[in-house]
Image (cartoon, rainbow, N blue to C red):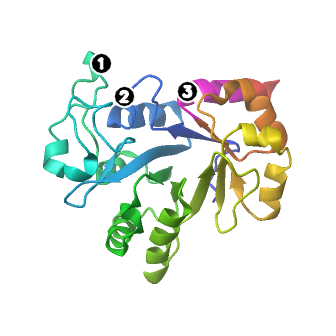
Amino acid sequence: MDIPDRPRPYVMAHRGNSAHCPENTLAAFRRAIDEGTDLIETDLHVTSDGHFVCIHDPKVDRTTDGSGAVRDMALSEIRKLRASCGRAEFSGECVPTLKELFDTVPENMAIALELKTDDFLEPATGQKLVKEIEAASRRELTVLLSFVSGRVQAVRQQARDAGFDIPSGSITYRRPWPEDGFELQGPVWPLLLLNPFYVWWAHRKGMLVCPLDLAPDRRLWYYRLLGCDAVLTNDPGKTLRALSRAERS
């Protein structure tokens, strides 16, 4: 997947700018956009009434003022919660829906959706997600991600049944080689030390590589040396400045 008019390595904002804003909130996404990130990454869970919401944990306890499992709560219940992570200046933030994310992110900016639950193995859930992506005209600049390959493949099959495809990626803590069947590989960064030929191997297979490293600035020289196509970061503004300095040196 190429992002028009943007040089590599692309910068992917992990849960938005989660270094300076509550993660996976519209405030975090907007700050990352304003700072010039190339991709917005978020996590998707499914409410009890079938809505997609941007939240990382299976429970709302850590990031909101509520408690309970996302899958046991209706969207109307989740919308009443404050997603400020205890920070008073963000008291107006709530858990956003996928549609709100699509409405917030510019049309020419890519979005990476990490599928966090086995609900995405269900055909009806996959069909609904595919329809939302299609309705937002986002199918070319959306990437499906998961640590569980089957979730991505299940949704992707629904897209293919609908007559198109969606780029997808595999994230791993353990596999020191690229997994076939994906356009993007997300190995935890020590795997690139264990196997320095990982990126070369992935490129030979036509895949992009974005190491799983939430604070990549100290290792940017290594990622650039290997030819990584993107870097993941909690602080996209800081990482963009570090990349700019590296390119000038």
Residue placed most toward the observer, 78 or 68 = 68
The question of residue 236 being in magenta is answered with yes
Q: Which residue is mark 2?
A: 22
Residues 121 and 96: in front is 121
Q: Residues under labels 3 and 2: Cα distance?
A: 16 Å
Camera-near label (1 vs 3) is 1
Mark seen at residue 216: none
Q: Nearer the viewer, residue 65 or 107?
A: 65
Which image quarter: residue 191? top right
In the image, taking residue 196 as reference, residue 143 lies left or right, namely: left
* Relative side of 128 to 208, left or right: left
Residue hosting label 1: 87
* Disc sitting over residue 237 in the figure: 3
Side of 73 where 97 appears, left or right = right
Determine the residue positioned at 66% across, 54% down: 185
Q: Visible in this render: residue 146?
A: yes
SS assignment at label 1? loop
